[in-house]
């Protein structure tokens, strides 16, 4: 029975339309059968067989709804209402209250199907039009069949009540759906915010929510780190792709935890390379020391990883300090990125470095030389930089 009112193969939105459509048919069936029996008891002409016929047609409409012929059902329902209740008003008069189901039909038609708005409007206007026509021709007119006064009053209030209930039920379903939709939308917004904050630094994510366009800033003093796994590509030859990606994810997840520990920003991964920055988007006075300490722990984590997994991974790490431009650009798949000579130099420090060591540029060395000991390597030919001194921390 549940599948009859809420088919599992429908989306939540379509289930709502299906439920309202079925209720719109099911509820009037009982009303019309009750009225038909009433008309039979009081021997009102025509209305008993007409009511039974209309009830059978509505039962068939339940099957049509089950097969998703909602527009056909709505059209049949509207036409049947006009014939049955219109005939009732003509026979029993305006005081019977049989005209009020037209108003209920006009309201319910706006919620009972997801067809074109023009169809719903026409259905509603037909019902309202029939109500007005009957009002013009029936108010004050003598009915063709007279019921006892008390019986007529009871029939009037019954029809008023039965005309109120269908719109109330439909609006209740619509309101319940609206509340659920709002809750789902709020949950989706929260999930989207979590995703945005996992991709961008908090300050940048907040700016994107307000500006919704390219965000670019200049930072005068930051430190950039590039780390690249050596020998990782060789794993593809011996392990399955799932295993390789699983190993990379496991190691980089440890690096992610370290960024939280030291309060630095992960910028991106490029294959088996990992890039972080200290001093963006929030200034950090000790950015060089913080990112160097992070680099030392990265070396340690690779060592522990090899011991626990039986791998032989090595890593090169390069660091440079100085000014950068940082921001978010583009329209699709945009990320927070950094540009400038400091970024390029950090990448070169990694590329020309030694495995399991940390190589820093002269700018970073000048900041760290009082706290850490480095081995100077003079006049190294660096692509795009020419000859320059670099400084190696072996550990």
Image (cartoon, rainbow, N blue to C red):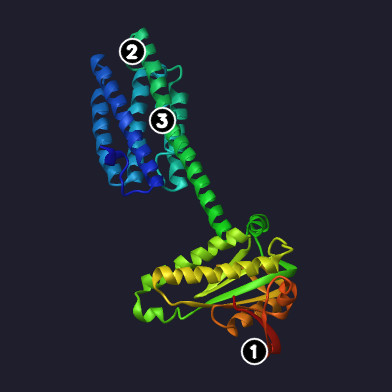
Residue indicated by mark 2: 146
Is 293 situated left or right of 144 in this image?
A: right
Q: Of the numbered discs in the image, which one, if any, rests on residue 383?
A: 1
> Circle 1 — which element?
loop
Q: Nearer the viewer, residue 94 or 112?
A: 112
In what element is the residue under mark 2? Answer: loop
Identify the residue at image location x=44%, y=72%. 306
Residue at left offset 43%, top offset 25%: 164
- For marks 1 and 2, the one nearer the N-term is 2
Residue 339 at what x, y percent from top left?
Answer: 67, 75
Q: CA distance from mark 1 to mark 3?
A: 75 Å
- Mark pair 1, 2: CA separation: 105 Å
Q: Earlier in the sequence, mark 2 or mark 3?
A: 2
Mark whose residue sits in front, 2 or 3: 3
Classify residue 243 by image quadrant. Answer: bottom left
Q: Are marks 1 and 2 in contact (CB under 8 Å)?
A: no
Q: Position of residue 71 (x, y in %)?
A: 36, 45
Numbered disc in front, either 1 or 2: 1
Q: Position of residue 231 (x, y in %)?
A: 46, 81
Mark nearer the viewer, 1 or 3: 1
- Which of the numbered marks, if any, corresponds to residue 281? none
Callout 2 touching callout 3 (CB < 8 Å): no
Total of numbered circles in the picture? 3
Q: Which mark is residue 169?
A: 3
Q: Residues within 10 Å of mark 1 (few under 14, many from 20)?
A: few
């Amino acid at each position: 029975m549940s599948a009859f009112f809420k088919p599992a193969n429908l989306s939540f939105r379509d289930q709502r339309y299906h439920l309202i459509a079925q209720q719109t048919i099911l509820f009037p069936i009982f009303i019309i059968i009750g009225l038909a029996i009433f008309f039979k008891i009081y021997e009102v002409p025509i209305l008993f067989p007409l009511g039974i016929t209309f009830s059978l047609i509505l039962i068939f409409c339940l099957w049509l709804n089950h097969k998703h012929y909602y527009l056909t059902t709505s059209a049949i329902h509207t036409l049947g209402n006009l014939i049955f209740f219109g005939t009732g008003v003509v026979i029993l008069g305006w005081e019977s209250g049989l005209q009020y189901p037209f108003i209920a039909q006009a309201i319910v038609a706006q919620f009972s199907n997801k067809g074109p708005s023009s169809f719903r409007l026409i259905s509603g206007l037909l019902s309202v039009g029939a109500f007005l026509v009957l009002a013009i021709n029936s108010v004050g007119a003598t009915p063709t069949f007279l019921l006892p006064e008390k019986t007529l009053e009871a029939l009037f209030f019954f029809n008023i009540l039965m005309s109120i209930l269908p719109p109330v039920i439909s609006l209740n379903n619509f309101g319940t759906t609206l509340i659920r939709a709002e809750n789902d939308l709020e949950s989706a917004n929260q999930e989207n915010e979590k995703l945005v904050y996992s991709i961008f630094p908090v300050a940048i994510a907040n700016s994107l929510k307000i500006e919704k366009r390219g965000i670019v800033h200049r930072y005068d003093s930051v430190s950039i780190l590039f780390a690249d796994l050596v020998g990782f590509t060789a794993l593809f030859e011996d392990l399955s792709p799932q295993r390789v990606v699983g190993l990379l994810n496991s190691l980089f997840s440890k690096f992610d935890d370290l960024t939280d520990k030291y309060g630095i920003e992960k910028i991106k991964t490029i294959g088996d390379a990992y890039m972080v920055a200290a001093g963006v988007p929030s200034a950090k006075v000790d950015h060089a020391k913080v990112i160097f300490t992070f680099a030392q722990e990265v070396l340690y984590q690779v060592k522990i990883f090899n011991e626990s997994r039986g791998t032989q991974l090595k890593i090169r790490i390069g660091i440079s300090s100085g000014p950068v431009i940082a921001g978010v650009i583009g329209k699709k798949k945009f990320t927070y990125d950094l540009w400038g000579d400091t970024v390029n130099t950090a990448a070169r420090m990694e590329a020309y470095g030694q495995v399991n060591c940390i190589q820093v540029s002269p700018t970073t060395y000048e900041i760290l030389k009082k706290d850490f000991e480095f081995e100077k390597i003079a006049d190294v030919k660096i692509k795009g930089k020419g000859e320059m001194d670099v400084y190696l921390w072996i550990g």
